[in-house]
Image (cartoon, rainbow, N blue to C red):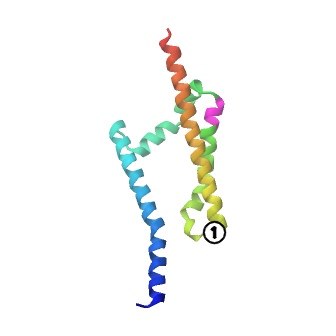
Amino acid sequence: MNIQWIHLSNLSANALKPVIQLLDLYIQTLDAIIKLEKEVGKPIKELMTEVLKPESLEEVSKLVPPETLGKLFRALISMAQISPKINKFLELSIDEKEAVAEDVKRVERDLEEFVDMLKRSLSDVKQLTSDY
């Protein structure tokens, strides 16, 4: 066998690993969306529109502290800013890809913190209402 061909084949296999991982994450995401849509009985797009409409956010703002909503708004604004870069990720330089990856990690952290803070706030509200 040609050593150069073996090296090229190995590089090709390594290059496909991120694609396979991406497909796996995509499958997990699709499965989660399907499960949510079955539970709620609405398409995800309709659900997100409902959740993010001003009236819904106003209701949430009555239940949670401002810093909780701040996490959500920060994440949404960041996603809007980095979305074009994500769509052109393969065209970016390595430095730009690293910067986008850091931005996405920050959005993920903000959303996780928002969900945790929201759950705590709603738990506190539930506790208060059950005391009456």
Left/right of residue 39 with respect to residue 15 in the rendered view: left
* Residue 47 locus on image (x, y percent): 43, 40
Q: Which residue is mark 1?
A: 94
* Residue 63 locus on image (x, y percent): 56, 24
- Seen from the viewer's position, the closer of residues 62 and 32 is 32
Dot 1: few (<14), some (14–19), or many (≥20) neighbours within 10 Å?
few
Give the magenta-colored segment's residue range.
66-70
**Residue 68 located within the stretch drawn in magenta:** yes
Residue at 55% from the left image edge and 27% from the top image edge: 120
* Residue 50 locus on image (x, y percent): 47, 37
- Seen from the viewer's position, the closer of residues 90 and 28 is 28
Left/right of residue 36 with respect to residue 83 in the rendered view: left
Residue at 53% from the left image edge and 15% from the top image edge: 128
What's the amino acid at mark 1? Ile
Residue 12 seen in render: yes
Which element is circle 1 on? helix
Q: Main secondary structure of the magenta part?
A: helix
17 w.r.t. 62: above or below:
below
* Residue 53 locus on image (x, y percent): 52, 37
